[in-house]
Amino acid sequence: MSTQATSRGQWSSRFGFILAAAGSAIGLGNIWRFPYTAGENGGGAFVLLYLAFVVLIGIPVQLSELSMGRRTQRNAVGAFRELAPGSGWSVVGGLGVASGFGILSFYAVIAGWTLGYIYFAVAGRFSAAMSPDASGAIFTGLVGGVVGPIVLLAAFMVLTALVVQGGVQGGIERASKILMPIFFLLLVALAVRSLTLPGAGEGLKFLFHVDFSKLLNAEVAGSALGQALFSLSLGMGAMITYGSYLKKDENMPMAAVAVASSDTLIALLAGLILFPAIFSAGLEPAVGPGLVFVVMPQVLAAMPAGWIFAVLFYLLLAIAALTSTISLLEVIVAYFVDERGWSRPSAVWTVTLVCFLLGVPSALSFGGNGFFTNMLGGLGFLGLVDMIFGKYGLTIGALGICLFVGYRWGIKNALEEIGGGGHRLPAGAFWGFLVRFLCPVAVFCILVLVVMGRANF
Ligand code: TRP
């Protein structure tokens, strides 16, 4: 085991793993998607459901993935192959690798915009007297271009590749140890700034006021669950892959809880940055994906020393996105290295090139190209890729993982791995119940909502 483990790379410590896994989990999903999805789904009710789903479904699925990874010391496909040789189950891992390609290709487009926005902020493009129309024009000017979005996509892919090329400890763990503390400092600074603005209380009310009629709404519930899975990086074997670099005696239950709670805390903190600031500026919270790119520049520009906070805010977004694209790329690279015997550098650069090429039509689907923008009744190419991989891919993947651990590999085996090193999972039987019954049923329900076109996450 040890030779295999060292040649594949391993986290140097539990803390290193937690930072890398939290880096994967914390991303655009927390700062860009969580606030606007909460905004569209009525605030507090969504937040409450989200918290329940993280505990009852997110953590159980996360532990399922991590235990498969650590047991087999294999990538998403290899883990299934090893635990159920000769069966068809490795298709679930294959779907995960495919989802990684798809998600990375469009995630890096949006991540690229954050680089553009850092530049705008530094160049002083956001001015205090900026109207909503002017802010909207800056956004469409950037994302509706041709060269700009493609160059930014390429830049983000190269940044990601440079880190992943460095390997598990020298690349991913090292980058996470530098980036995550910076991220956290920026986050706290921005939250303090936002919460001390006049009228910030309105934003807090919006985020935490629970409209009970929305608690029982299937669409709100489906969106909250879908968002919880995406935010914790579940359903495509990212945690199988990261778990495979975890030492055998490391405390897995504790690490999982640390990752899930920091992810949740940071989504809430992002809400605490955005909503008070938005309400304080008298703007609308339920504006969809434009929240951080159209509304926030106006908010930031109106603050004293606003341009500095604007630079910090978009830097925060870029760092969050980078530690996530790293994990998406690592899932695919680990597959090619383990299963196909490629060297890490050739896997990294080949996959990067393919993802970039697949990302180009997504980069052009905000006006850069009429066909990619308007296809499928306005869904657009990026919307299509998100639908196939981000929604179908991840939910089918999560369902497959629950069924595999619950009924094929078995709860007993999984619990034995989770409890390795004497760190037994408290309430293991309850965990088994969740993985066998609640998680698959709940994930199946989101799948139905996705098929019906009613899952808004
Ligand atoms: N969790 C990240 C976010 O919130 C996105 C992400 C990274 C992801 N790796 C993943 C989502 C793997 C699903 C699967 O932005």
Image: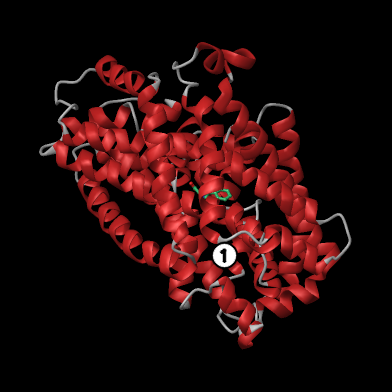
Q: Quadrant of the N terminus?
A: bottom right
Residue at horizontal 71%, vertical 75%?
Answer: 428
Q: Quadrant of the C terminus?
A: top right
Most extreme residue toward the right, as rendered? 86
User: Label 1: which residue?
Assistant: 242
Residue at horizontal 61%, vertical 62%?
Answer: 241
Which of 404 and 168 lies nearest the eye of the viewer?
168
Which of 163 and 391 lies nearest the eye of the viewer?
163
Q: Is residue 149 left or right of residue 37?
A: left
Q: Is residue 80 above or below residue 312?
A: below
Three-letter residue code for mark 1: Tyr
Residue 146: percent from left, percent from top: 40, 20
Any part of residue 454 in sight? yes
Q: Is residue 48 above or below residue 306?
A: below
Q: Is residue 422 above or below residue 186?
A: below
Most extreme residue toward the left, as rendered? 304
Residue 17: percent from left, percent from top: 48, 70
Residue at horizontal 21%, vertical 41%?
Answer: 311
Mark 1 neighbour class, 10 Å CA radius: few under 14, some 14 to 19, many 20 or more = many
